Image: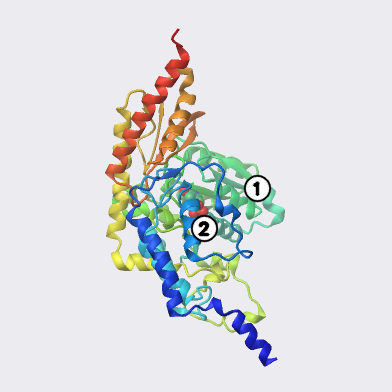
Amino acid sequence: MREKIIELEELAKSLEPGKEEREALRSKVIDYTEQFLDEIGGIPAYFKEKDGKNEISKTEPGKEILPIDEIINRLKVEMDREGINPASGGHLGYIPGGGIYASSLADYWGDITNRYAGVFYANPGAVKIENKMIRWTADLMGYPETAHGNLTSGGSIANLIGIVSARHAKNIHATIIPSSCIYFTKQAHHSVAKAIQIAALHECQIRYVEMDENFRMDVVDLEKKVKEDIARGLNPFLVVGSAGTTDVGAIDPMEEISRISRENNLWFHVDAAYGGFFILVDEIKQKFKGIELSDSMSVDPHKGLFLPYGLGISLVREREHMKKAFAFQASYLQDITAAQDEVNPMDVSPEMTKHFRGLRIWLPLLLYGTEPFRACLEEKLFLARYFHQEIKKVDGFDVGLYPQLSVVTFRYTDGGEDNEAINRRILEEVLKDGRVFFSSTTIQGNFTLRLAILSFRTHLQTIDLTLEIIKEKTALVVKEFQKIESPVN
Ligand SMILES: *Cc1c(COP(=O)(O)O)cnc(C)c1O
């Protein structure tokens, strides 16, 4: 038996490389990532998919063994040179963020030391860091001492936690699901409807609240719908507002929604995944007034604090509602459930074991303070206004609403019946060029171009370049359509 054990130990040895081997592996990975960062200004924001040859799909982990140089090369060529480049300041599509460097080192640290951040007993330090960051965020949003939260993988899970907490707080059990009502607008992020479905609340009465001309929730309509439902003997219990919609950056009227919620005993959840951290900028803090009165909220540091992907935060005003929804006991956990000051992250989350996410937000805030984040966010607000002002001056373009946050919508409208086709072609040409990336949406039935500015690497020069590219591609496309329309000879 001893011989067998020693033989197995020998076979598993590559899992514990020695100092020199670690150094060799590390330096190659670091060489690559350093080069990536040095060149980031010149690496396209978008790569059209290459035809044919892609070694990644042919690579067979578990079946073949490759040297690190070959692995890095395949990743470089086949992964980092395809599709969207989210690290690029030219990423102006969907909702960008960027990925600040300090967080990557925090992740590295967290992986090496492998702290267990699920329970206080296992690693009080890691849990204190996590809970400290939750407290910091709760303070920022104006939540009381009774609030708590959880560091999630992103905004979708944070929305799910809020909505499941609402279900428990309002005691929405199976028999009353069909008579219970949920309210939000068609601007709400799809992860809200997804969370409602995962929480098995999709058989509730879903009410789409009307919006005003700025795509904000029409609170008169909300109140009317709630009252009507009550009069019908139904059970209104949840309203979801947005502090910055993904589509256009609309901020719902928080104060009014919280008043209506309070008066009618509704749970008010705010999806602030995109917009939440703009609260660092005074001007936006005013527009968010009333957000502190909500019952739960989601924010996304991997958007608004520019962290690498993998961090959202759910906040719940009264921590007891989170615990009611997520705390479970098991005999093999008896050592860890003894009374303690700190909430166990696993007691307020669907997850148990998870990556130590606290460090990736704690480290950059401790290194730099909040001021650079605030300034960077304010810069983005101004860049959006600048783009809005400048694209309006470009011949043929119509621009959407003055940006409430950092999203601008615009479209070419001088092409009559060809407008949609022209806008699609402009976007196609911009993506083919690849120096910047943006996306499209549909607004009031119209195919519309859309710029979302939130990468910490996006600056004035990026926006000037974007304007230049749009002008250049539009001229090309318009000429193309003129040729189709009036074929010479
Ligand atoms: C991005 C986003 C989400 C989803 O967050 P993920 O981090 O992608 O899961 C939810 N709501 C809004 C408003 C968003 O912008």
- Can you identify the residue that label 1 sits on? 204
Q: Is mark 2 within 8 Å of ligand 1?
A: yes
Q: Which mark is residue 158?
A: 2
Identify the image quadrant of residue 60: bottom right
* Quadrant, the N terminus: bottom right
Identify the image quadrant of residue 400: top left
Residue 243 drawn at (x, y percent): 43, 48
* Quadrant, the C terminus: top left
Q: Nearer the viewer, residue 1 or 244?
A: 1
Would residue 297 be visible to someone looking at this image?
Answer: no
SS at mark 2?
helix
Residue 12 drawn at (x, y percent): 59, 79
Residue 37 drawn at (x, y percent): 35, 56
Q: Is mark 1 within 8 Å of ligand 1?
A: no
Q: Nearer the viewer, residue 438 or 186?
A: 438
Q: Residues within 10 Å of mark 2 (few under 14, many from 20)?
A: many
Residue drawn at (51%, 37%), measured in percent from left and top?
A: 221
Name the residue type under label 1. Cys
Outermost residue to the top: 489
SS at mark 1?
loop
Residue 202 drawn at (x, y percent): 65, 48
Cα–Cα gap, marks 2 and 1: 21 Å
Name the residue type under label 2. Ala
Q: Is residue 135 above or below residue 386?
A: below
Circle nearer the N terminus (2, 1): 2
Identify the image quadrant of residue 452: top left
Outermost residue to the bottom: 2
**Mark 2, mark 1: which one is toward the viewer?**
2
Q: Nearer the viewer, residue 188 or 301?
A: 301
Q: How did the renderer colour the structure?
A: rainbow
Q: Residues within 10 Å of mark 1 (few under 14, many from 20)?
A: some
Residue drawn at (45%, 19%), measured in percent from left and top?
A: 481
